[in-house]
Image (cartoon, grey):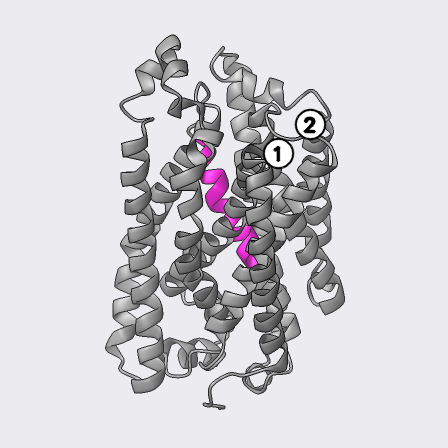
Amino acid sequence: MATKSFDHPFVDKVQQRGLLTGACGVVLLFILAFADSQQFFQSYLVSYIYWLVISLGCLGLLMLHHLVSGRWGFVIRRLLESGARTLWLMAVLFIPIALLGMYHLYEWTHTDVVAKDPILTFKKPYLNETGFYIRAVVYFALWLLWMFLLTKWSREQDETGEPGLKSRMINLSGPGIPMFILTVTFAATDWVMSLEPHWFSTIYGLIFVIGGALGAMALCILWVIKLKDVEIYREVDAFKYLSDLGTLMFAFTCLWAYVSFSQFLIIWSGNLAEEAPWYIRRSHGGWQYVGIALIIFHFFLPFFLLLQRAIKRRAALMTVIAIFMLIMRYVDLYYFITPAFGHGGASGLYRYVADVLTFVSIGGLWLGFFAMQLKGVPLMPLHDPRMAETFAGEGH
């Protein structure tokens, strides 16, 4: 089996173009921030959350892989590790929101508004700037700690082949899963749900957990298809596991639909004044069509396509479906976040320019950093004893 570090022209191209695009975009973002700071932070938040959720999805799937040791996980483990390591970048990109953007985004940071609102006054022990900062530090500290240890031990395993590293990664991933679900839930509450602080949903965080796994899986599918001719992928015939990856994307699509519908059903049946306005706001002003589009294109269409095994074995079709799912992930988050602003930012073309510019800028940096992490290490974990056992067996 090939043992050399991984290098590929496509990865070099993604790194160079991604970082260049991101760097140029950052310059334009400074101009945008000075031109209309409120719209800038609204657009920035949507784009930031999109890429952060994919990073978190990679970390969650990485821990899941260590616990189940399925063949699919060994094929995409390096991709998941590279995606999880972008959390360093996302921690840095969170600073503008924390230091400069809170007043533009969250009404509970306005003391005059809180003083006149009994609900916000009641929630003040949780919704306050000090708590926001402390919790954000805790979230990133835990995510970065788990990411650092899992990727560090994985790379040490490649270099030394020490059998004990396998147990370390498994033992860390066990408590890592509940930690991950809890921290993502609270982070989604702090950074997104609190945009509409009167509203609450106990399922909200789970939607972000599943959405992150779905986005991360779609991204991994694209990279597996693009790198299918790499020597080590050819040796294990990685392309034949594309169907398994498609099945997992199908499962996450169904889970996303289930929890999203559960949230709607609970709120609709309860019909409480604190909960119903979230959906009422998204049933007017054109947002109702976005909601219908999500039902059709984020669930029904991929559901029926991914049911067919023949489609999941065709690279061209899976490429289209994976790209489409990544687009729908953005639409879903846009639907979650933007109506909360009501709309207090810019309108018309300028607003959409801000949306596109922030997405491309953060995305360029994310992809460039992702490609940078992928280079220099073998594309598959060469000395993990589970890999030989798993690929030698008959089951998945």
Res 94 label? none
**Where in the figure is residue 2, as x and y percent of width and height?**
49, 90
Residue sitting at x 62%, y 81%: 9
317 or 145: nearer the viewer? 145
Q: Is residue 145 above or below residue 201?
A: below
Q: Label 2 vs label 1: CA separation? A: 7 Å
Residue sitting at x 35%, y 48%: 180
Marks 2 and 1 close (CB-CB < 8 Å): yes
What amino acid is found at the position of numbered circle 2 in the picture?
Trp
390 or 245: nearer the viewer? 245
Question: Earlier along the polypeptide chain: callout 2 or callout 1?
Answer: 2
Residue sitting at x 44%, y 45%: 96
Q: Is residue 120 above or below residue 168?
A: above
Q: Helix, strand, or loop for circle 1?
A: helix
**Where in the figure is residue 380, as x and y percent of width and height?**
47, 78
380 or 341: nearer the viewer? 341
Q: Is residue 188 in view from this perspective?
A: no
Query: Which region of the structure is painted magenta?
Result: 203-217
Query: Residue 135 is drawn in which quadrant?
Result: top left
Q: Which residue is mark 1?
A: 335
Q: Helix, strand, or loop for circle 2?
A: helix
137 lies left or right of 80: left
What amino acid is found at the position of numbered circle 1 in the picture?
Tyr
Q: Is residue 235 magenta?
A: no
Q: Which residue is mark 2?
A: 287
71 or 181: nearer the viewer? 181
Query: Residue 231 is drawn in which quadrant?
Result: bottom right
Residue sitting at x 38%, y 76%: 386
* Label 2: how many Cα within 10 Å (few below 14, some 14–19, many 20+): some
Q: Is residue 234 above or below residue 111?
A: below
**Where in the figure is residue 130, as x and y percent of width and height?**
27, 33
